Image (cartoon, rainbow, N blue to C red):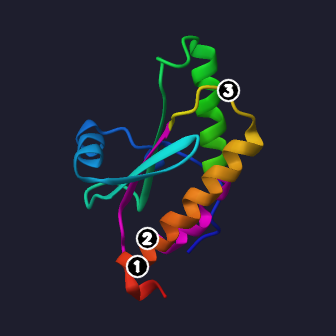
Amino acid sequence: MKDPKNTLGKTERLKRRKAIEQLFKKGKHFSVFPLRVSYAFIPYIETSLQAGFSVSSRHFGKSTDRNRIKRLMREAYRLQKQQLQEATVPGNVKLALFFVYVGKDVPDYNVVSEKIGVILQRLTGIVNEANPQNT
């Protein structure tokens, strides 16, 4: 396998309406305030790991605030997803994730990065439980 890069390309983003609907209908979720993550094993997504990001316009009326928070979440995810990605590859596991920011204040990067790190560690454990051949 070639050297993995810390990228978040087009194929790694969750965009298909069908996959997103199935994720919210049949997937599981948990919260690590101020983030809520939904996840599901969806066999027909393109890559082993796809993620989506959302911020409510109810709490953040200005699009600049919503875009800033999504940018912070994407950056923190991009830099920390490696361990989760390595857990999904061996068993050909296809995992779809959706991060929703549920806080009411614009966070700074350190808070978002720390919380996404906790979420990704928990998800890595979930993937390893669901796919015992990884261990």
Q: Could one spot residue 98 in this view of the protein? A: yes
Residue at mark 1 to residue at mark 3: CA–CA distance: 34 Å
Q: Which residue is mark 1?
A: 129
The structure residue drawn at horizontal position 58% and vertical position 11%, both measured from the top left corner, is 62
The picture places residue 90, in percent across and down from the top left corner, at 43, 79
Q: Which residue is mark 3?
A: 106
Residue at mark 2 to residue at mark 3: CA–CA distance: 29 Å
The picture places residue 99, in percent across and down from the top left corner, at 48, 43
The structure residue drawn at horizontal position 58% and vertical position 66%, both measured from the top left corner, is 121
Tell whether 48 sits left or right of 27.
Answer: right
Q: Could one spot residue 91 in this view of the protein? A: no
Give the amino acid type for the residue marked by disc 1 in the picture.
Glu
Q: Earlier in the sequence, mark 1 or mark 3?
A: 3
Give the amino acid type for the residue marked by disc 2 in the picture.
Ile
Question: Is residue 80 highlighted in magenta?
Answer: yes
User: Disc 1 vs disc 2: Cβ atoms closer than 8 Å?
Assistant: yes
